[in-house]
Image: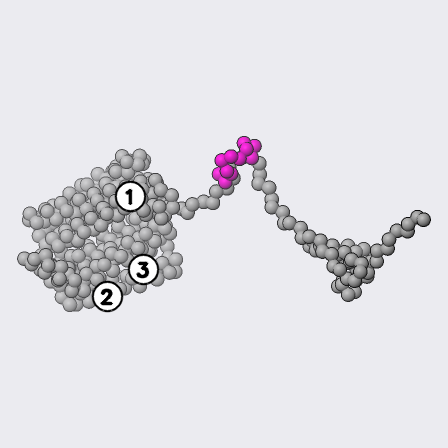
């Protein structure tokens, strides 16, 4: 491997650490806040988003020199650093198989680093541009349709992995003019259709992954996501983009790639992985003792709340000529037959004439 290859390998390794750091920071930020809005505005959560962006930019730079299978496998290895970091920072439990998976990940990534041969620049043709842009549009439609019909979280996670894997393929195919100045490179990227496909792939993948985490378990969703993101684009890059393996390292590279994915599947079910994906439910409505004011008496804590009874309507006195006619209010109960005449219309109701008592003379 050339010096440029080792430099790109260092960049993507730092990106893997950035992904792990972002997961831990976002987990801590979610634990220290209540509600989705407060979590998204927490400084630690925002710092995690910054590390996510930094890792993604580093991966796009590394894809100009390294093969897709190397970059994607190293990024999948970020789960090992996440588990170790969550064990130290969040105090999560580390199972025995998690420790084995971390060791397997480190050995597999080391084998992949030595198996990566010198990669040639991809000849980006118009047919390749059309295929990648069409794939980006297709993933938008497929992902939207899966979310619309409430597909299982695993299906949506697979779509998310394929979308982010498509972003890796675009990053590998993105033509960067050699020896050009910064302004010329920026102008070339602004006029390149693959940049739009890159943004569409990345936005679709991140949105679908968040949707999958909301509708499925963290472990299976993460495992399916990384499996789809590593395996599918790696095969496409070897077949269509000309990614090569160092001579004599084809079998070790394949085994190392498969072991990395397998270790990621195991680590996705680790308690530490669940600790870094803290859900933020809506704030519950206070009830019981929490709803009482601070100055409430002590005996009110155990007293059940009193029901609120409807206020009875006032009696009505209808003036019909000289004597008043009294009618009781409607209380929603059946009228006694004795007083049924009182419920008749005013015109049909009998009149009760009040007469003064006789006075003694």
- Nearest the viewer among 302 and 198 is 302
Please provide percent x and percent y for residue 271: 33, 40
Please provide percent x and percent y for residue 244: 12, 54
Marks 3 and 1 in Cβ contact (< 8 Å): no
Measure the alpha-carbon separation of dots 3 and 1.
31 Å
Q: Quadrant of residue 340?
A: bottom right
Residue 301's disc is none
Q: Is residue 73 visible?
A: no
Residue at the outermost top position: 298
Marks 2 and 1 in Cβ contact (< 8 Å): no
Q: Earlier in the sequence, mark 3 or mark 2?
A: 2
Residue 134's disc is 2
Q: Earlier in the sequence, mark 2 or mark 1?
A: 1
Residue at the outermost front position: 361
Which residue: 17% across, 67% down? 127
* Residue highlighted by disc 3: 143
Which region of the structure is painted magenta?
A: 290-302
Q: Is residue 43 above or below residue 176?
A: above
Q: Residues within 10 Å of mark 1 (few under 14, many from 20)?
A: some
Q: Is residue 300 above or below residue 248?
A: above
Which residue: 18% across, 41% down? 107
Please provide percent x and percent y for residue 356: 86, 53
Q: Residues within 10 Å of mark 3 (few under 14, many from 20)?
A: many
The question of residue 292 being in magenta is answered with yes
* Residue highlighted by disc 1: 43
Measure the alpha-carbon separation of dots 2 and 1.
38 Å
Which residue: 25% across, 62% down? 136
Q: Quadrant of residue 240?
A: bottom left
Q: Is residue 354 above or below residue 277?
A: below
Q: Is residue 281 left or right of residue 226?
A: right
């Amino acid at each position: 491997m050339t010096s440029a290859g080792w430099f790109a390998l260092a960049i993507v390794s730092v990106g893997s650490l950035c992904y792990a750091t972002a997961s831990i920071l976002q987990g801590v930020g979610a634990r220290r806040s209540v509600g989705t809005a407060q979590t998204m505005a927490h400084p630690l959560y925002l710092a995690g988003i910054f590390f996510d962006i930094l890792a993604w930019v580093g991966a796009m730079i590394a894809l100009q020199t390294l093969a897709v299978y190397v970059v994607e496998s190293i990024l999948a290895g970020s789960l090992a650093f996440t588990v170790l970091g969550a064990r130290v920072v969040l105090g999560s439990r580390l199972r025995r198989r998690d420790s084995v998976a971390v060791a397997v990940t480190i050995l597999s990534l080391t084998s992949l680093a030595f198996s990566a041969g010198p990669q040639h620049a991809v000849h980006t043709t118009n047919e390749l541009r059309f295929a990648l842009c069409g794939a980006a549009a297709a993933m938008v439609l497929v992902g939207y349709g899966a979310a619309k019909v409430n597909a299982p979280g695993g299906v949506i996670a697979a779509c998310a992995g394929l979308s982010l894997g498509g972003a890796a393929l675009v990053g590998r195919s993105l033509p960067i003019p050699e020896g050009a100045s910064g302004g010329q490179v920026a102008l070339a990227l602004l006029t390149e259709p693959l940049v739009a496909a890159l943004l569409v792939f990345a936005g679709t993948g991140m949105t679908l992954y968040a949707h999958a985490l909301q509708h499925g378990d963290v472990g299976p969703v993460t495992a399916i996501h990384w499996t789809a993101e590593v395996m599918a684009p790696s095969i496409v890059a070897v077949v269509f983009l000309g990614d090569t393996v160092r001579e004599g390292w084809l079998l070790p590279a394949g085994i190392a790639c498969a072991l990395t994915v397998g270790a990621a599947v195991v680590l996705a079910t680790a308690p530490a992985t669940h600790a870094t994906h803290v859900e933020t439910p809506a704030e519950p409505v206070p009830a019981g003792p929490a709803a009482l004011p601070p100055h409430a008496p002590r005996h009110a804590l155990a007293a059940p709340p009193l029901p609120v009874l409807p206020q009875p309507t006032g009696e009505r006195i209808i003036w019909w000529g000289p004597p008043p006619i009294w009618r009781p209010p409607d209380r929603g109960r059946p009228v006694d037959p004795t007083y049924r005449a009182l419920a008749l219309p005013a015109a049909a109701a009998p009149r009760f004439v009040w007469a003064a008592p006789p006075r003694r003379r």
